[in-house]
Image (cartoon, rainbow, N blue to C red):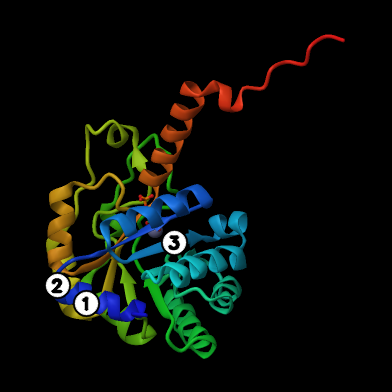
Amino acid sequence: MVTLREVLKQAETEGVAIGHFNVSDLITLKAVFESATDQNVPVIVGASEGERQFLGVRQIAAMVKSLREECDFPVFLNADHTHSLASAMEAAKAGFDWIVFDVSTLPLEENIRQTRTAVEALKTIRPEILVEGEIGDIGSGSEIHDTARDLRKGLTTPAEARQFVEETRIGTLAPAVGNMHGMLKSMVAGDTKKRLDIERIRTIKEQTRVFMTLHGASGTDDGDLRRAIAAGITVVHINTEVRIAWRRGLDRALSTQPNELLIEPAAPS
Ligand code: G3H
Ligand code: ZN
C-alpha cells in the first residue's frame, strides 16, 4: 500500500492537491470515503480533538484502518488541530498517520520550542508519522460566523515560515494566507467567497520547500483554490461544508420521510 508521504510527493509533482475532510460520525466518514472511492482519488480523514472526543481516538483509527485494508484504498487519518503533546501522543499510539500540532496562539519562539519537542517525541512513537506545525492566525471553529475577522494582522510571513520549518523540522506547514476556519452566512448563501494571497503562498513555498496545507478552505473562491495549489498547496482542509451537507441532508430526510422516524404519541389507556 502506498504511504501518505508518497501520495503527497506524487501530488506535489503533478501539481494537484489531496482533499482532507473532517468527520465527526460514521455518516460523514462514509460520505467522505465513498466520494473518494467514486472519484478514485486518495483522501485524508481528519478528526480534531473535539471530534476525537466524540468518536473515540482508537475507534476512529480502527474504522479508517479497516476501510484502508479491506478496500485496499489509500485513505489516511489525521489528528487535526491537536493542542497538547499528550493528546498528540495518544493519537500517534492509536495509529494516526498525521498529527497537526497546533500551538499557533503562542508567541513564535514558544510555538517553535513546543512544536520541535512534539516532532521529536512523535517520531519516537512512529518514525514515519507526518507532523504539521502552524503559524499565523486563521481563527478557530468550523461553524457559521456572524462577523468577518480582520485576517491581515495574522498572516504568515515567509521569513517566519522559513525559521519555523528549519528549527522545528516539521514535515508540513499550515500557513495563514487569507484562509480562515468556518464560513460567514454570506458564504453559505454563495454571495461572498474567501480570497487567498497567492503570492504569499508561492514565496513561502520557495522559502521552506515543505508540503503546505490550506486550512479553512470551505467557501473559498474556486479560482483561488486552483491558483493556490499551483503555487504550492498540497493538501486542502474542508470541514464546515461537510457539516452543512450533513445538516441539510438530515433536515431533508426528516421532513420528506416522516414515517421512518415519526414517533406517535402513546394512545390513552
Ligand atoms: O482543520 C480543518 C479545516 O481547516 C476546516 O476548515 O471548516 O473552514 O473548512 P473549514
Ligand atoms: Zn484547520
Q: Answer few, some or many: residues within 10 Å of disc 3's Cα (few below 14, many 20 plus, some between 14 and 19).
A: many
Using the image, determine if residue 57 lies above or below residue 189: below
Does the image show residue 205?
A: yes
Q: Mark 1 vs ligand 1: CB under 8 Å?
A: no
Q: Mark 2 vs ligand 1: CB under 8 Å?
A: no
- In the rendered structure, are the residues bearing label 3 and label 2 in contact, judged by CB atoms less than 8 Å apart? no
Does the image show residue 102?
A: no
| In the foreground, 25 or 188 | 25
Quadrant location, ligand no. 2: bottom left
Check disc 1 and give the amino acid type: Gln
Q: Is residue 51 left or right of residue 207?
A: right
Give SS at disc 2.
helix
Using the image, determine if residue 97 lies above or below residue 140: below
**Location of residue 229 (image quadrant):** bottom left
- Residue 152, image x, y percentages: 25, 53
Q: Mark 3 vs ligand 1: CB under 8 Å?
A: yes
Which residue, given by chain and number where applicable, does mark 2 sit on? 14
Q: Residue at (54%, 87%) from the top-left corner? A: 125
Q: Answer few, some or many: residues within 10 Å of disc 2's Cα (few below 14, many 20 plus, some between 14 and 19).
A: few
Which residue, given by chain and number where applicable, does mark 1 sit on? 10
Single out the mark in the foreground, 3 or 2.
Answer: 2
Check disc 3 and give the amino acid type: Gly
Check disc 2 and give the amino acid type: Glu
Which residue, given by chain and number where applicable, does mark 3 sit on? 46
| In the foreground, 222 or 72 | 72
Among numbered discs 3 and 1, the one appearing first in the sequence: 1
Q: Distance between the residues labelled 1 and 2?
A: 6 Å
- In the rendered structure, are the residues bearing label 1 and label 2 in contact, judged by CB atoms less than 8 Å apart? yes
**Quarter of the image containing the N terminus?**
bottom left
Q: In this view, does 71 lie to the left or right of 224?
A: right
